[in-house]
Amino acid sequence: MWLVELLGCLKEKVQTMNGTFNGQILVEKLAKLNNSQQSIETLSHWCIFHRKKAKQVVETWDRQFHCSPQEQRMSFLYLANDILQNSRRKGSEFVDEFQKVLPDALSDVIENGDEFGRSAALLLIDIWEERKVFGCRGQILKEELVGRTPENSNRNGKSSCFKLKQSVGDTLEKISSSYQIVCDVSRDEETLLSKCRTAVSGVEKVDKEIGGNYNSGKRNGSRFVDELRGQHSILRECIEQLRLVESSRSDLVSHLRDALQEQEFKLDQVRKQLKVKVEATLK
């Protein structure tokens, strides 16, 4: 069995060196994809290396996304994000292809995923819009997925429009919805911070062990590397989730600020009207 696996690895490396794209290899890699930075970045680099086959890469990504378990689909979106962010300077192949399939994929996560997946997907949309990943298309993509466009049909003729709880212009609904999201995503905030502190302590411990004993570092090099990778993966996942918490709180503060300004404006109008009425009465 080990010989078959070894031959498979050698075959893959030879194909990569020769620049040959193999769709089945991508299918196998996607099946093993997880949320760790190493997993995402490694596969992202492989895909970007084969950017001339961007159409086949994205078609395979799309097909496997819809076949994957619901809990793995955010990993697919993180992979797409990494490919988009790191391939743009080399060409627009992946941007052109991903913009065809991402609306359906994002809509699926937003409608069928858990609260974390939904918030993470919406955060990715904001990032792509802010960084102009899809140019002017980014704003259209956002409007389609937050329900500001009345109707939006996907390639299967089904509605892919996701209606957010809050309606445009309804300040109370915006605040209520934003507050609920903050409560949902920040429920485990202390646990996340604790995990971060533990991971940082783990990294510092390894650093002290290596720095304090050179020979020990040489003997246990492999163990140290594995431990550092594990702590780094934990930190990355915690940071991603804390960014969602930060983004959610920022949205809530923004809506509260808008509501405050609106009420201050209306209060000023009432006071002016009241002053006019009082002056008219006195006359």
Image (cartoon, rainbow, N blue to C red):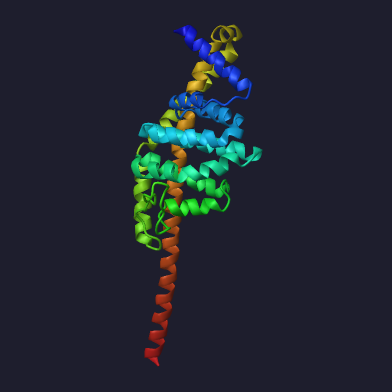
Nearest the viewer among 236 and 100 is: 100
Quarter of the image for residue 86 reads top right
Q: Judge left or right: residue 272 versus residue 17.
A: left
Q: Nearer the viewer, residue 145 or 95?
A: 95
Q: Residue furthest right?
A: 90
Whether residue 176 is situated above or below residue 232 in the rendered picture: below
**Could one spot residue 186 in this view of the protein?**
no
Q: Quadrant of the C terminus?
A: bottom left
Query: What residue is at 42 percent from the left and 52 percent from the top?
Result: 146
Residue 68 sits in quarter: top left
Q: Position of residue 61 (x, y in %)?
A: 48, 34
Q: How many marks?
A: 0
Q: Quadrant of the N terminus?
A: top left
From this viewpoint, is residue 73 visible? yes
Place of residue 145 in the rendered image (x, y in percent of width and height, measured from the top left): 43, 50
Q: Residue furthest bottom?
A: 283
Residue sitting at x 65%, y 37%: 90
Q: Residue at x 50, y 34 (%)?
A: 79
Closer to the camera in the image, 39 or 276:
39
x, y percentage for residue 76? 46, 34
